[in-house]
Image (tube, grey):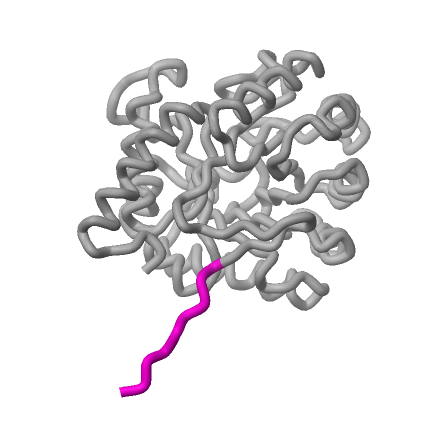
Amino acid sequence: MVSVTIAPLVWKVRFTTLSFERPLIMGIVNVTPDSFFDGGKFRNPNAAFAEVLRLSSEGADLIDLGAESTRPGAQEISAQEELGRLLPVLEKLKGKIGIPISVDTTKSAVARAVLESGVSIINDVSGLTQDAAIADVVAEFNAGLILMHRRGTPETMQSLANYEHLMEEIVQELSEGAALAKSRGVRDDQIVHDPGIGFSKNAAQNFEIINRLSQLKVLGRPVLLGPSRKSFIGSVTGETPENRLAGTIAACALGVERGANILRVHDIKEVKSAILVTNSIIKHNGKDFLS
């Protein structure tokens, strides 16, 4: 019998190549006044800078900065306003941390400006449906690209949570986004997929996505899961975002068991400890989380 060696997944993010011997933990810092959990806490550049340093010291593998709320019902802001929130923080961060920085944006003008400021990854929560020119910018800078599944905009997305075959449709739409990115020069090894927990999905659909997360592996790229403190957790616990840490950890642990490679969360120390244990249990059961 001829043995076949399957190359391990890697993610090329401009200045470095990330591998997945264990799940990576991405810390969230929102420099917004209106995000659902931390809105307003880090709008001041000094506060945001301090929070990035704190998350990095707690073991974050990546940081994701967001300057425009994408919660249900949020209204779009201009690229100028978005950059006015981001660039002062990025200026303070230059040379201060040794982990890649991602920026959550749906605008190619913002993507270009933050990449020029040293960012390594663009996290497009529209999956290139809002501004396909993001792919051109990512290709030019050899940056990492996160393609998240979402239908519509924050103002309309919750009215678009109608699926006949939930996972099959998510896989198809993410595949279309990846094909568009590659047609504009982005390499396959620059792409990560995110099923978009809470975006154009109801609570039951979010639980189903996590339960069936392994089906995203057909796309052949790493999978990012972002359940942190979201309302689907509160739908069963009755808790406010401030009290959803335990539910977040449960979602992350089950997500890793079902194939998540990256977890995007607010709470680095607690989630990372839980995931190190989860990953060790999986490996000692003879099943690697990448399989």
**Residue at the image point whose x is 32% and y is 43% from the top:** 255
Q: Is residue 279 above or below residue 42?
A: below
Residue drawn where x is 57% and y is 31% of the image? 70
Residue drawn at x 26%, y 87% as measured from the top left: 1
Instruction: Using the rendered view, name the quadrant where residue 29 is placed.
Output: top right
Q: Name the side, left or right, on which 171 lies relative to 18.
A: left
Which residue is at the far left? 285
- Asked if one can make out residue 264 in the rendered structure from this viewpoint, the answer is yes
Q: Is residue 215 left or right of residue 57?
A: left
In the figure, 98 relative to 183: above or below?
above
- Main SS, magenta region, reads loop
Give the residue at x 63% y 52%: 128
Q: Quadrant of residue 142?
A: bottom right
**Residue 290: percent from left, percent from top:** 36, 56
Q: Position of residue 196 (x, y in %)?
A: 46, 43
Residue interval drawn in magenta: 1-9
Taking the magenta stretch, the answer to whether it contains residue 229 is no
The picture places residue 93, in percent across and down from the top left corner, at 71, 26
195 is higher (above) or lower (below) than 136: above
Q: Is residue 129 visible?
A: no
Q: Nearer the viewer, residue 117 or 36?
A: 117
Q: How many marks?
A: 0
Residue toward you, 269 or 104:
269
Residue sitting nearer the eye, 225 or 262 = 262
* Outermost residue to the bottom: 1
User: Picture coordinates of residue 130 (x, y %)?
Assistant: 66, 47
